[in-house]
Image (tube, rainbow, N blue to C red):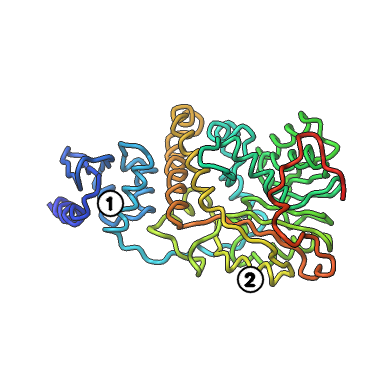
Amino acid sequence: MFWQKRFGDFADRLIHYKLPVRLRLWNGREVSLGGDPLVTLEIRSVQALRRLLRPSMATLGQAYVEGEIDVVGAIDDVIGAVAQIAAHAGRIGRHRPRMVRHSRKIDAEAIAYHYDVSNDFYRLWLDSEMVYSCAYFHTPDDTLEQAQLQKLDYILGKLRLQPGQRLLDIGCGWGALVLRAARNHGVRAVGITLSQKQFELASRRVAEAGLADRVEIRLQDYRDVSGPFERVVSVGMFEHVGLKNLRGYFAKINELLTDDGICMNHGITSSDPESAESPLGGGEFIERYVFPHGELPHIGLVLKELSAAGLEAADVENLRRHYALTTQHWSRRFEQNGERLRELVGEKRYRIWRAYLAGCTYGFRHNWIALHQVLAVKASASDREPLPLTRDYMYEPPPASGAPPAAE
């Protein structure tokens, strides 16, 4: 009787908001929270009901992942419904991720947990080049394949690559960026990763492309790399660095960079100025199940630590809307390949990633998180000025594949 009363009080509170949600208990009792329900949450036990009565993206996400709650409806509608329930009925305080000492061992374990699931797993919902980072859309109708190649060319164009230069890619994934840089710009590229599976596949792709004389893939921590490099790029990696380690991370990039070099950091940022807020508990879910030890800085903190490390931010661009489109493509492909993905990684991990990808789309759309590209040079390089006066060069057409541009 106690839990029935609590459930009744909870439903009465939410009915006022007319949410398109139906709640179904294990005993068959149903309550509609609005008009025609788009989503049904099937509460399978009293334990699951306890989580529902203290709702957040974290508690309801955990209940779904652990099989205590099942969902019926399109996954985007489910995430939207959960967010509304948490907003109207939750008690959400500020959440700061646990501060972790980011040792080489801890970071390697965290990377292995996230990236070494299975190359086949990622292949089922990424683009054909397996680029696992924010794409760049000229129009919302661009295909994911188009947008990812456009992103690679956009980054490489911003870096003003010249034939013969050395490029370091920190967190190279499955090698798409270093391969394109060597093939189209004539650079000598080094890509580093802490993921064994990424290292193996990226190395194989380099060999198959006949670029082993120009591209090297290493299983290596960025703290152990020696330079110099005329260009340094990091795409979707610094989220694993840790807030306390940002200055050291940027100082290492500064150390690796030649005096007239250019670097870019492309990564997810928090929309909270204190680098702490986790709207409706979404960050807690990601920390528990998806990115252990991940920490997202606000762009203000990024620029502060970058400057303190001796670099000058020359250009800053927010691609938040592009990442919302990217994760939407990923989520749809994930849904289309749901049964095969379940077979590959099991029910629990399938649920984790299903909720994560759709939740990211919601988060980027609602400005909970953002994506910033920061182009930088050495602060001491003012007498060399490696970048043009305007941004016009960033929008020049990329060179044709296999035809590196002539050196200036």
Between 374 and 337, the one nearer to me in the picture: 374
In this rendering, does residue 118 appear at all?
Answer: no
Between 254 and 396, the one nearer to me in the picture: 396
Which residue is at a point 17% across and 37% down the rendered structure image? 28
Where residue 378 appears, as percent x and y from the top left, is 77, 66
Decide: is 52 above or below 397.
Answer: below
Decide: is 260 above or below 135.
Answer: below
Between 88 and 349, the one nearer to me in the picture: 88
Q: Quadrant of residue 180?
A: top right
Q: Earlier in the sequence, mark 1 or mark 2?
A: 1
Q: CB atoms at circles 1 and 2 under 8 Å apart?
A: no
Q: In which quarter of the image is residue 16?
A: bottom left
Label 2: which secondary element: helix
Which residue is at a point 56% across and 53% down the rendered structure image? 319
Between circles 1 and 2, the one closer to the viewer is: 2
Between 275 and 59, the one nearer to me in the picture: 275
Residue type at tag 1: Leu
Q: How crowded is mark 1: few (under 14 residues within 10 Å), some or many (20 or more)?
A: many
Which residue is at a point 54% across and 31% down the rendered structure image? 124
Decide: is 64 above or below 97.
Answer: above
In this rendering, does residue 239 appear at all?
Answer: yes
Q: Mark 1 points at which residue?
A: 52
Q: Name the residue under label 2.
A: 304
Where residue 2 appears, as percent x and y from the top left, is 14, 54
**Label 1, label 2: how far apart the Cα atoms are:** 40 Å
Residue type at tag 2: Lys
Q: Quadrant of residue 226?
A: bottom right
Where residue 157 appears, as percent x and y from the top left, is 72, 48
Where residue 98 appears, as percent x and y from the top left, is 51, 63
Label 1: which secondary element: helix
